[in-house]
Image (cartoon, helix red, strand yellow):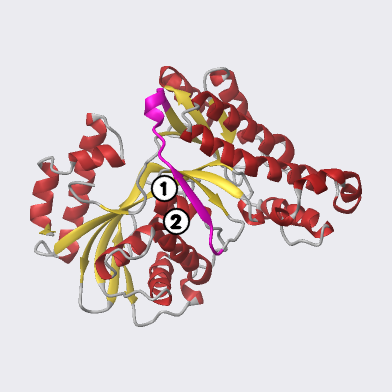
Amino acid sequence: MANTKELIKSIEGGAYDATFRKLYDNSEAAVATQRARYADTVRRFAEIYGEEREVSIYSAPGRTEIGGNHTDHNNGIVMAAAVNLDVIAVVSKNDENIARVKSYGFDKQDVIDLAQLSPNESEFGRSGALIRGVAAGIVQQGGSIGGFDAYTTSNVLRGSGLSSSAAFEVVIGAVLNGEYNNGKFSAVDIAKISQYAENVFFGKPSGLMDQTASSVGSAITIDFKDPANPIVTEVPFDLAKYGFRLCITDTKGSHADLTDDYAAIRSEMESVAAVFGKKVLREVDECEFFAKIAEIREKTGDRAILRAIHFFADCKRACDLRDAVKDDRFDDFLRLIIDGGNSSFEYNQNAYSIKHPQQQGMAIGVAVSQKILYGQGAWRLQGGGFAGTIQAFVPDALLNEYCAEMEQLFGEGACYVLSVRNYGNIKVTENI
């Protein structure tokens, strides 16, 4: 462990360059960017907490959904991947049992008394609630906690569908796991603890996909048949090997007044399950469902039937996507991405809200993506849908054209060029 001055000297001298290539990008420009970013973050820590403090650095990535659109809430299967945007935290332990966290871009420092580990409704929706909640989750799982001072910075784009809040939760979990628990908690353990913090302390009833993808890293499938014990299968995924980049485009749609649209997907899937006396679709036999469609539609309506068809197909497709990556069948992977996008559009029907049919930014983005990438790449809507982001796998030869078209449609900076990161939550050292 080094003090801040020693660490800055090591970073700027290139000692961490090999690590930056693994976590972010192999290009010289990307390495130089991270070298400057890390050194600046350590300096900011030193300005607040002192130059002589011995420090460690932790990182947790953002994530993107690849397959299994709206399947997790009915105990289905999803495929997701960590991306090369992350939250980093420069950390030093203290003996005060106080967690102090200052984050770049936010005026207020969070100061959390770790002797108080009960949810506080006045903290709902605030970062301090996540810090307290993660600490409480560590203790609840038999771990140890203690005070620390931290400075964090994030390039996980807020509101982009890349789960900046999950990355923050996970990096706090990584800090406490590394500094006070000798790393005894697994990546999935940290994900569960982070979800607990978000659900109980932050006041947001999120699923487990975001935190798991961030904490585990790489491309993964998550089987939620038993939500308390999800089955995570990891598959390293190098898009650059195929000459492709991952593009996420923010279509700048408004999420206002969409709560009912999101809720209807879950409730309609569950209404189909209820016909069979089940709580969620995962408990329903697919063959029995198709045999009884005529009967079910009279009780649930047709859209619920179509959304159930999407659920069954997209759960299988998430596994097929994983296997295509594992078996090095990239053409099959691209085809499955397109099939999943079509299923979301046609059957799950979350490309736009029927309350605002004149606002179809996601649908336009999908259509233009198809025009550019047809026969050469893949495209789909992702996440909640109705408004938000679309995902594309773009060959290098079309990258500039694709980004230019998307930004002409949705504004400068709307298209983010990313890659899959094969590391989840991690203590950043010279050699990883």
Q: How packed is label 1: few (under 14 Cα within 10 Å), some, or many (20 or more)?
A: many
Residue 318 position by quadrant: top right
Left or right of 179: which side holds 225?
A: right
Q: Are marks 2 and 1 in contact (CB under 8 Å)?
A: yes
Mark 2–mark 1 distance (CA, rounded to whole Å):
7 Å
Residue sitting at x 27%, y 55%:
58
Residue sitting at x 54%, y 27%:
334
Query: The residue under label 2 is which amino acid type?
Result: Ala
Position in image of residue 410 (x %, y %): 52, 32
Residue 210 is one of the magenta-drawn residues: no
In the figure, 323 relative to 5: above or below?
above
* Label placed on residue 166: 2
Q: How packed is label 2: few (under 14 Cα within 10 Å), some, or many (20 or more)?
A: many
Which residue is farthest bottom?
Answer: 115
Q: Which residues are magenta?
A: 228-244
Q: Is residue 349 visible?
A: no
Which numbered disc flags the more N-terminal residue, 2 or 1?
1
Position in image of residue 205 (x %, y %): 57, 63
Residue sitting at x 15%, y 60%:
46
The one nearer the camera, 148 or 376, is 376
- Judged from the image, the secondary structure of the residue bearing numbered disc 1 is strand
* Label placed on residue 344: none
Left or right of 271: which side holds 228?
A: left
* Label placed on residue 62: 1
